[in-house]
């Protein structure tokens, strides 16, 4: 039980850290890596964008 809770907390922190990092980037920087602002949450959740 505690291991699963610790894992969920770790996953949440990782998600927030990724969202924060990508959100601070300028639009041109996101474009350079093939993203736009609408992609940030999908990427942070570990998803993949459709090719």
Image (cartoon, rainbow, N blue to C red):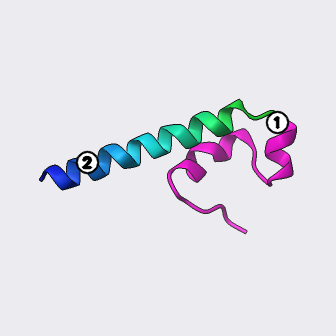
Q: Which mark is residue 6?
A: 2
Where does residue 30 sit, x and y in percent of width and height? 79, 44
- The residue located at (63%, 44%) in the rendering is 40
- The residue located at (84%, 47%) in the rendering is 31
Answer with the quarter of the image where residue 23 lies: top right
Tag 2 and tag 1, C-beta contact below 8 Å: no
Q: CA distance from mark 2 to mark 1?
A: 34 Å
Tally the marks.
Answer: 2
Where does residue 34 sit, x and y in percent of width and height? 80, 54
Answer with the quarter of the image where residue 27 lies: top right
Element assignment for label 1: helix
- The residue located at (75%, 50%) in the rendering is 35
Answer with the quarter of the image where residue 38 lies: top right
Where is the C terminus found, in terms of image quarters?
bottom right
Q: Which mark is residue 27?
A: 1
Which dot, 2 or 1, sits closer to the camera? 2
Using the image, determine if residue 3 lies above or below residue 9.
Answer: below
Give neighbour class at mark 1: few <14, some 14-19, many 20+ (Cα, 10 Å). few
Left or right of 8 on screen, residue 18: right
Element assignment for label 2: helix
Using the image, determine if residue 18 lies above or below residue 20.
Answer: below
Left or right of 26 on screen, residue 50: left
Q: Which residues are magenta?
A: 27-51
Q: Which mark is residue 48?
A: none
Q: Earlier in the sequence, mark 2 or mark 1?
A: 2
């Amino acid at each position: 039980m505690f291991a699963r809770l610790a894992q969920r907390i770790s996953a949440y922190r990782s998600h927030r850290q990724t969202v924060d990092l990508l959100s601070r980037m300028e639009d041109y920087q996101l474009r350079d890596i093939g993203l736009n602002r609408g992609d940030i949450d999908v990427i942070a959740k570990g998803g993949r964008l459709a090719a």
